[in-house]
Image (cartoon, helix red, strand yellow):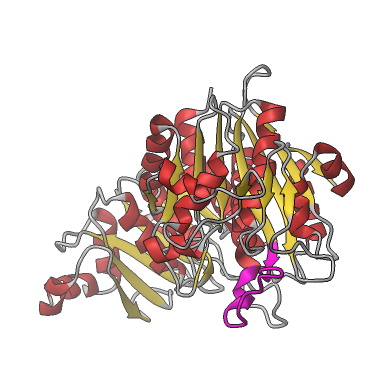
Amino acid sequence: MTQPLALTFAETDLDAIATRKGRVAVVIDPEGGLSVVARRVNKLTRGALARLTEAESFAKKKAGDVITLAWPQGLVAEALDVVLLPRRAETALLRKTGAKLAKTVGAEGALVLAGNLNTPNELALGMMLRAYDYDAQKTEKAPAKGAVTVMCSKPEVDMTALEAIASGVFFTRDLINAPANVLTTTHFADLLAELSSFGIEIEILVEDQLRELGMGALLAVGQGSDSPSKVVVMHWKGGAPDEAPLALIGKGVVFDTGGISLKGAAGMEDMTMDMGGAGTVAGTMKTLALRKAPAKVVGIVGIVENMPSGNAVRPGDVVTTMKGDTVEVINTDAEGRLVLCDVMWYAQERFQPKAMIDLATLTGACIVALGHENAGVFSNSDPLCNAFLKAAGAEGEGAWRLPMGQAYDDTLKSRIADMKNVGGRPGGAIVAAQYLKRFVKDETPWIHLDIAGVASVKGETATAPAGATGWGVMALNRLVQDGFEA
């Protein structure tokens, strides 16, 4: 799996600046003020920083800009990156600026002179998150980035927390970016089993066990594939032994053809990302374990492949869920909710969680509604939902709450079964959430996150290259940290 950037913090050593190889970055105020560190760089470069800040063009620069001076006089470094940041810059700006610096780091690494920047850890996290490149399937690998040292006035930074976040996000990105012939249902489960090395208890349920449990909806989705369906339970027991856990539920469709309701050919290759919900749950569990979160969290993912074959579930078939409700399958391409409903019911029956959050690349309708900027948020609990939205906002991960209501639920009525798996086209993302709500017990606070638009994108984001973003790992980690830890 992709490893995070090697990064350390150190006290400022003015004498080390001149001889540092690779790149040197120095933070200065957007108004042009030079700190003690910047003044030393200015002296070493024979007044280059002073000339820069006095130039007419400097007035047009803004916070977050990075100005590069190649082969600066007085430094061994190949480049001097002048970073414009106020001392108390906001988190989003710091991470975005750190991401800009990460793209410049080469094999010889970099020295970042953060001076008295208030939260240099956020600048560093931006660098770590953006220093990602998925090249597992390439024969020619990208050159490894060298180590980065961040010198600042307060170098006492919790690197364990930063590395845990970056590792969890990278794990999610690697899983979502992997092609379906590599990330089969079996290989996916095997990779999750390896999380046991971090202290997570892992249990893998196979098809015979799923049949015994009555997971007829989940099994129906995978019955057209040669790859066996599985449910993986990941249990982090960082809280009190008798404490009920937070349950994170993930849709893990490793490839979605649509089944008999076959998708069009254009863009079908992107359906390798349809296990994004399960990937996000896995990355979150890894982050919690790496930072040894004092909380009880169980992550449960349903791993299947949706393929057309002579054995595949058909439109018009009726399947029986673990809850016992029957579902008329109108569209086999609305398969994610069939996977989730069984896993959600299993989580509640077995663990009686204090709250439950499911994540899924569930509907194209959510992308139509919110684009690629926000995940759709649906909930039966205002306190839980507001806590999540606060956590997502703090981490800069877009999320927007959408309504629910009986009128949407009514569209799921079936003539021959307890419900259909789809309603009409209007409000498709909301109707999908209403379907899932039928499998949430009254006493369970619940959130459904439709991450279809944010799990993987065509262009780069502020802290990720094109492809898998790792959206949700940081927000869920923050939610646990703020509301579920002892």
Say whether residue 128 is visible. Answer: yes
Q: Nearer the viewer, residue 486 or 124?
A: 486
Q: Nearer the viewer, residue 246 or 195?
A: 246
Q: Which residues are magenta?
A: 254-271
Furthest-top residue in view? 242
Q: Is residue 136 left or right of residue 459?
A: right
Quadrant where the N terminus lies?
Answer: bottom right
Q: How many marks?
A: 0
Say whether residue 18 is visible. Answer: no
Indicate whether 173 appears above or below 200. Answer: below
The answer to which image quadrant residue 288 occupies is: top right
468 magenta-colored: no
Q: Is residue 187 left or right of residue 143?
A: right
Q: Residue at x 27, y 69 (%)?
A: 65
Q: Nearer the viewer, residue 355 or 109?
A: 355
Task: Provide residue 122's location: percent of width, then percent of height.
Answer: 40, 50
Furthest-right residue in view? 208
Task: Provide residue 426's location: percent of width, then percent of height.
Answer: 42, 60
Task: Provide residue 359's location: percent of width, then percent of height.
Answer: 56, 49
Task: Provide residue 469's location: percent of width, then percent of height.
Answer: 51, 62
262 magenta-colored: yes
Q: Residue at x 56, y 26 (%)?
A: 354
The answer to which image quadrant residue 97 occupies is: bottom left
